[in-house]
Amino acid sequence: METTKGSIKFSSYQKFVIVLIALTQFTVVLDFMIMSPLGDMLMKSMDMNTAQFGLVVSSYAFSAGISGILTAGFADRFDRKKLLLFFYIGFILGTLFCGLAHTYPLLIIARIITGLFGGVISSISMAIIADLFALQQRGRVMGFVQMGFGASQILGIPISLYFADIWGWQSPFLMIVAFATVVWLLILIQMKPIAQHLLTPSADRKHALLHLWHTLRQRRYRVGFLATALLSLGGFMMMPYGSAFAINNLGVRQEQLKFMFMISGACSLLMMPLVGRLADRVSKIKVFSFATMWMVFSVIAYTNLPIVSLWLVILVNTLMMMGVMARMVPAMALTSALPHLQDRGAFMSINSSLQQISGGIAAALGGMIVQQETAHSPLQNFDKVGYFIFIICVFSIYMYNRVSKSVSQ
């Protein structure tokens, strides 16, 4: 690869891989993120309270976390392309089950199945990125890949809500199935095998439990695991209840939600590549710290909003989502630099598991803190969630400083 002005250019194949990974992230993120804008509709159609809806969200996260732990010992024993294809087709089938579910218990089961497969896809994708891209490129790669999140908001969520308004809340899941099937076929046909890690000698790779233990016992890895867990705790505590808060507390109408998500998604989409370049050229930890404090203050502002104009709600929500996404880019780039080549699959699987499990705990805690007397009454204690997030995020800055020091050694 050619070096210009201190940065490493991407090859044409690397650019294609970035697009494929971004598309997989788009579908997986949309499957999870759509639960928030559908939250008010789901709670009313299935007569769920906030705690029950929190369990729907948490069931995906907990199953994804368990799956990642079980997969960690085997993650470095196979071609990463084959692993991605296997888990992605499982995710597609689980999402199809979600679209066919018509009762609360069936929805819980469907989310568990989807999480078992979908939760591992992110870790496989991060291992692929670490294998194919130099550290000096990863900030930009993460910026482009995380554009899948912005695209899910700017395109996926508004289109999904449009379908949901016409054909019911199940239709967005069926839309995801159709799109993800096309992406799966592209990976099958166009992506090259990714098996360079299999050429690196590793005495414990043949023994799954031994390889898992070897990964867990390394101190620098454990610092990264804790930092990732805090990252998820700070993000997932309020996110599942955002649409219910907007509708029942701020007076936003159901049909206006799509515009709110579209605008915040567009701003995040435009910002992600810029954050990635800044993280590569300036300092990943400085960018992370600034973005975290930006997120924290906008979260506190949003959770304490009274009934105000729609445009002020959209502005604060957009600033909040930009902060949430901006901190993900440098955080993931830093974490990806921790594991050695022969441990990357296991490390990323464990890391993804802790991210999912801590996210599930956060969603469940949020469901217990936030109260709603009836399906149409305002949410109570939502401001307390913002203060909890403030404490968690300040501690996460400290932990990622430790990650940064470990990477630079």
Image: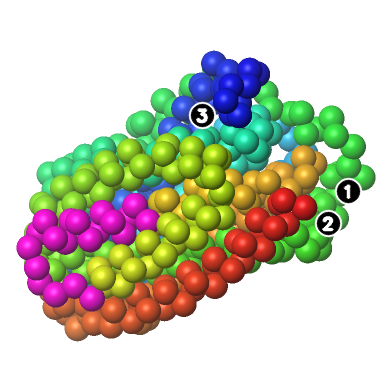
Tag 1 and tag 2, C-beta contact below 8 Å: yes
Q: Quadrant of the N terminus?
A: top right
Q: CA distance from mark 1 to mark 2?
A: 8 Å
- Which of the numbered marks, if any, corresponds to residue 44? none
- Mark 2 sits on what residue? 214
Taking the image as shown, residue 205 lies to the left or right of residue 86, namely right
Q: Evaluate whether residue 121 shows in this view.
A: no
Q: Position of residue 68 (x, y in %)?
A: 63, 54
Q: Secondary structure at mark 1?
A: loop
- Mark 3 sits on what residue? 18
Q: Position of residue 84 (x, y in %)?
A: 59, 35
Which quadrant of the figure has residue 179? Answer: top left
Assess disc 2: are there few (<14), some (14-19) or many (≥20) residues with their C-alpha within 10 Å of its C-alpha.
some
Magenta-span inclusion, residue 319: yes
Magenta stretch secondary structure, dominant: helix
Instruction: State whether residue 8 is above or below residue 295.
Output: above
The residue at the point 59 percent across, 33 percent down is: 137
- Mark 1 sits on what residue? 204
- In this rendered view, identify the residue nearer to me: 45 or 119: 119
Mark 2 or 3: the one toward you? 3
